Amino acid sequence: MDLATPGTPEQYGDSDDLVRALGPAGVWTEALDHLPAAQARDVVQELEDLGYFSLWLSEGMRREVFVNASMLLGATRRMVVATGIANIWARDPAAMTAAQLTLTEAYDGRFLLGLGVSQAFVVEGKRGHVYSRPLEKMASYLDEMDAVRYESPAPARRPPRVMAAVGPKMIELAGRRTAGAHPYFVVPEHTADARAALGAGPALCPEQAVVLETDPDRARAIARGYAEFFLRLPVYRNDLLKKRGFVESDFENGGTDRLIDAVVAWGDADAVQSRVQAHLDAGADHVAVQVLSPNRGEAPLKEWRELAPALQACSGRTADRAASGHPAA
């Protein structure tokens, strides 16, 4: 397959097809990386049987994300496995493209590449690279991906790719150069702004952290244990401070109740569904739901089972596109 000619956004996969494949809500998790491989395969098979269309995997100092995706794709029949995200500093554009095309062709289009620039402390402190000008780096990286010549059997068309994006410039780049955006740690108001910036075409797939717990103190304790780290990172902190009505004092002592309740949904299945629906009503096509467990790294199987019917009942602006069901079903 000759990919030497740069593509247009329309060539990076049809967003309608992508939305139908993902469904209105899917699973975003790091928990499977903490399980032995055989157990992770069993869990992902159950998630598929529960009716989840999609699974988002992150990249950290754990399993290599493409090998991990291949392992889980091989354990399922219909589920889309997406990277949320594959770090562009971790491999060169030729390697990234080859991995994407290999998995897309091998698993009948059930792989979705999500790209991201990660964070400076990861890129420099853990990987030993120089983190500089992330927006320019991403743009040039996409150019180099488009120029790759791939000589193995490949999909008939360019497969979709999405891009991690929170700030307006990164969102603009995602809409112009990929099939859509995958914002992380954002509120429904961010989703509305992102949809306005992207326009009607590109897919918008935010992540939403949730705690299936109705006791406010227990729920917020779990949420703070997760959110405290992200509230220190400039990209998320700046959006909340400058655009969402929060002030510096909201970030003290792990975050005020108001701030924690905004970034992490908690309560029963109906409360979680309501937050996911809020993103869909604000213009999201798909919400990647990250269930937070009281024990970090523990797979929240009980919660995934309980949430499945509620999440499958969600619908939004793309309900007509998703209603036809999973394309591989």
Image: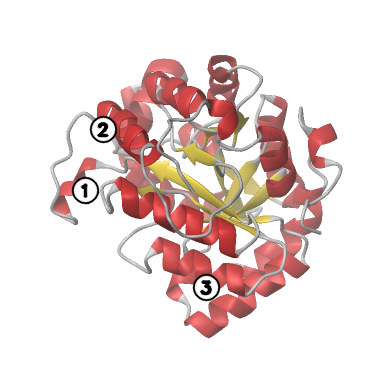
Label 3 or label 2, whichever comes before in sequence order: 3
Label 1 or label 2, whichever comes before in sequence order: 1
Whether residue 298 is visible, yes or no, is no
**Percent x, y of residue 297:** 45, 68
Amino acid at the residue labelled 1: Val
Residue 88 appears left or right of 201:
left
Q: Which mark is residue 71?
A: 3
For the residue labelled by badge 1, is the local secondary structure a helix, a strand or a loop? helix
Q: Residue at x 65, y 31 (%)?
A: 284
Please tell me whether residue 153 is drawn above or below residue 284 in the rendered image: below
Please tell me whether residue 269 is drawn above or below residue 317 in the rendered image: below
Circle 1 sits on which residue?
123
Specify the quadrant of the image occupied by residue 276.
top right
Would you call the spot at circle 1 few (<14 residues within 10 Å), some (14-19), or many (20 or more)? Answer: some
**Percent x, y of residue 112:** 55, 50
Q: Residue at x 27, y 53 (%)?
A: 90
**Percent x, y of residue 269:** 74, 52
**Percent x, y of residue 87:** 34, 49
